[in-house]
Amino acid sequence: MSDFLIQSPEAGPAVHRPAIAVAVVMRRERIDNRWQPWRWVLADVVPHEDGFGDQPRLLLKNEHEERWLHPGFKVELFTDDAEGYYLNVTTQQPCFWVVWRMEEEAALADEPVAVPQVVTLSYHDAGRWLDAQETVEQLPVPPAVAQWLQAFVDAHYVLEAKRRQRPQSFKTLQDRFGNPARVSTDKTFGGSGHG
């Protein structure tokens, strides 16, 4: 299979972002569970090829599994999400994140099919989708994609200098209404002040 086609920004009035074209392979696999005999998982993220066309298609079907190819995804890099890419590329294993949903695709199959929605390299995007209870899976990126992502991070991410935090002992104490609080070292018992 060919390498990922890396598209560089082009000069001109329109905004062009660095991007790669990918296709997603989803796998339906048999599991040993009487209540749910099948499950869907992310199988692969591969370079998009023109021969894939633009419609999902069944690649393999037997008694143990099905594999579906979903072509035509564009993984773009946005300068305002450079931190999200930095958090990905600085892990031990940078990865693609794929959001997918079960959909009733009558044209594809008699049963619901797992359909990818988005492919990203942003740690922040993946976190937002997980917070929204979406199904998000990840797969390692090949070295060429990791290098491309690292070059983008190097060009666009500026690590913020950590500010020295003021010691807590220098902060004024406040009550729950924001007024200065008074601290007494006198011990009182019973609430009436009489000991």
Image: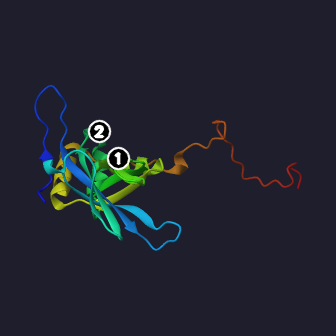
In the picture of the structure, the residue carrying the numbered disc 2 is: 80
Q: Is residue 30 above or below residue 121?
A: below
Q: Which of the marked residues, 1 or 2, is nearer the chain's N terminus?
A: 2
At a point 63% along the width and 41% down the height, the residue shown is 174
The amino acid sitting under disc 2 is: Asp
How far across and how far down the image is residue 69, in percent? 26, 55
The C terminus lies in quadrant: bottom right
Q: Rate crowding at label 1 as few (under 14), some (14 to 19) or many (20 or more) other CA atoms within 10 Å.
A: few
Q: Is residue 195 above or below residue 173?
A: below
Whether label 1 touches label 2, CB < 8 Å: no
Res. 49 in view: no
In this rendered view, identify the residue nearer to me: 127 or 59. Answer: 59
Residue 165 seen in the figure: yes
Q: Is residue 154 left or right of residue 124?
A: left
Is 162 on the left or on the right of 169, as rendered? left
The residues tagged by marks 1 and 2 sit, at their Cα atoms, a distance apart of 38 Å
Tell me the number on the disc at residue 107.
1
